[in-house]
Every structure is written in C-alpha cells, then in structure tokens.
Amino acid sequence: MEKLTISEKSELTQKLIDGRFFYEDLELFKSKFPYSKLNTELAYVNAYNQDRLHGQIIYNLLDEVSEKEIKSNRKKKADELKAAAEAEEKAKKEAELKAAAEAEKQVEANTETEETQQAEVQETEMQKPAPVEKKTTQKGQSKKNSQK
C-alpha cells in the first residue's frame, strides 16, 4: 500500500464518511488500533460527536488499510447483517407455522372432546327410563297417595 499525502487522506476521509457505516468502521478501527487514545473518546460516542469521531477513525484507518479494504469490510458486515435478518425472519415464520399447527391441533382436540361429550349425553338419554304417568283418582290425588 502506498503512503497517502495529507490532502489525499483528507479527501478520502470526507468521501468515506457515511453514518450508516459508523459501527462497521469502528469495529475495524478497534481491530487495527486496540490501544489507540481515540478508543477512550469512542467509548462516549453520541449523536453530537459521531461525525467528528467517524472522520478521525477513517483518517487513522487510512494509515493501515486502503479505501478498498474499508469498503469491503462495510460490505462484509452488511452481508452478515442481511443474513442474520433473513435467519431471524425464517425463525419467526417457522415459529408462526408451529403456533398455527399447535392451534389447529387444539381445535381438533376440542372438537373431538365435544363430539364425545355429545355422544355420551345422547347415550345417557337413551338409557333413561321413560317417565311414569301418574293416574289420578276422582278427587285429583294420585293413586299412590290415595293408597296410604
């Protein structure tokens, strides 16, 4: 890798600053410069100082890696995130399908239980003796009571 001039590094830094890739660049920076004084300041990154720190990260990275390597690292991380998101989506769909199958089994079990209960009720009704008719006497009392 050829040594860049200060003006070339500054131009490339401005060109490469993109807030979407801050954390990818930060990870690369920490792997290349684990004992940098900038790491202390990076521990307190926020919305107000992120652009400035991103510029410092890239400026320092250009001493060790090329523009091409920075871009390939960003692409690799983006691909990893995309794969992770796809895996998460797949797991979510599988969970939904499993839950739907479980619910369907529960509905079938409930239907079978209801059918069994209805059959038992019908069977019980069939086994009940027919109601006995009470014969009444002339005075309106049942025969059973009048025999006492």
Image: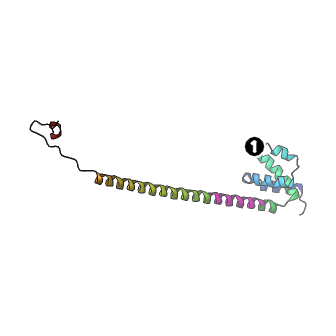
Looking at the image, which is closer to me, 147 or 63? 147
129 on left or right of 63: left
**Count of marks overlaid on the render:** 1
Can you see residue 10? no
Classify 133 as above or below 12. Answer: above
Q: Which residue lies at the image location 28% right of the left edge and 51% below the top edge?
A: 128
Q: Quick one: quadrant of the N terminus? A: bottom right
113 on left or right of 86: left
* Residue bounds of the magenta highlight: 73-88
Badge 1 element: loop
- Taking the view exactly as shown, the residue that stands out farthest to the left is 138
Q: Is residue 75 magenta?
A: yes
Q: Position of residue 76 (x, y in %)?
A: 75, 61
Q: Position of residue 123 (x, y in %)?
A: 32, 55
Q: Main secondary structure of the magenta part?
A: helix
56 on left or right of 140: right
Q: Which residue is mark 1?
A: 46
Can you see residue 138? yes
Q: Position of residue 72 (x, y in %)?
A: 77, 62
Q: Which residue lies at the image location 75% right of the left edge and 59% below the top edge?
A: 74
67 on left or right of 145: right
Q: Position of residue 103 (x, y in %)?
A: 49, 55
- Taking the view exactly as shown, the residue that stands out farthest to the front is 148
Q: Which residue lies at the image location 78% right of the left edge and 60% below the top edge?
A: 73
Q: Is residue 80 magenta?
A: yes
Q: Amino acid at mark 1?
A: Asn
Looking at the image, which is closer to me, 29 or 120? 120
Looking at the image, which is closer to me, 121 or 60? 121
Q: Quick one: quadrant of the C terminus? A: top left
